[in-house]
Image (cartoon, rainbow, N blue to C red):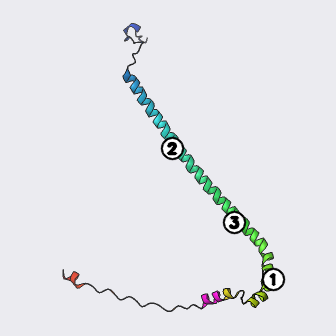
Amino acid sequence: MAARKNATTRAPRNEILDVNPRHVWLAALGGLVVARRGIAGALHQAGLRMNVASADARDAMRQFDTTARAGIEGLNDRIQPFLCPIGRTVQAGIAPLAERVGLKLGAKHAERRKAATTKTRTGRSAARKPVARRKAAAAR
């Protein structure tokens, strides 16, 4: 059989605990530590949420930019065949008026193209001369 301890052999427990100022002080310190850890954890979580939110915002902006560019390029491809002939006819209609005033339409573009293509390279620059060695450093 298992031995049973007699209840009378145990040390008597004091049912009424005296609360002194030291107990209050230690409990307050413990509460402050718990509160500080809780606030630090909450701030950390808030920072993580802000990082996730900013990453989501950047992703949404990239997606919007890609969608907008695709839409504009598609619109440009559809409209350009109709607008180019209209532009040519307007330019052809304005050309006689511009000549009377003394303006040349399209001449600037042609001059720029010629200037860009007629530039020639002057040649290579002369090779650098080797640096003379210092005799004072060698004499040491």
Q: Residue 42: which numbered mark, if any?
A: none
Residue at image coords 76%, 72%? 77
Query: Which mark lies nearer to you, 3 or 1?
Result: 1
Q: Is 118 a magenta residue?
A: yes
The correct choice, above or below, for 89 with respect to 64 in the image is below
Q: Which residue is mark 1?
A: 89
Assess disc 3: are there few (<14), some (14-19) or many (≥20) residues with their C-alpha within 10 Å of its C-alpha.
Answer: few
Assess disc 2: are there few (<14), some (14-19) or many (≥20) residues with their C-alpha within 10 Å of its C-alpha.
Answer: few
Q: Amino acid at mark 3?
A: Arg
Q: Amino acid at mark 2?
A: His
Answer left or right for 112 relative to 83.
left
Q: Which residue is mark 2?
A: 44
Badge 2 or badge 3: first in the primary sequence: 2
Name the outermost residue toward the left.
140
Predominant SS of the magenta segment: helix
Badge 2 or badge 1: first in the primary sequence: 2
Answer left or right for 96 relative to 118.
right
State which region is magenta: 111-120
Q: Quadrant of the N terminus?
A: top left
Q: Which residue is mark 3?
A: 69
Residue at image coords 66%, 59%? 63
Q: Amino acid at mark 1?
A: Thr
Cα–Cα gap, marks 2 and 3: 38 Å
The reply to whether the C-beta atoms of the residues labelled 2 and 1 are less than 8 Å apart is no
Residue 92, x across and y down, in percent: 79, 85
Residue 73, x across and y down, in percent: 72, 69
The correct choice, above or below, for 77 with respect to 45 in the image is below
Cα–Cα gap, marks 2 and 1: 65 Å
Name the outermost residue toward the front.
101
Assess disc 1: are there few (<14), some (14-19) or many (≥20) residues with their C-alpha within 10 Å of its C-alpha.
Answer: few
Residue 94, x across and y down, in percent: 78, 84
- Please name whichever residue, 43 or 8, is drawn nearer the observer in this view of the structure: 43
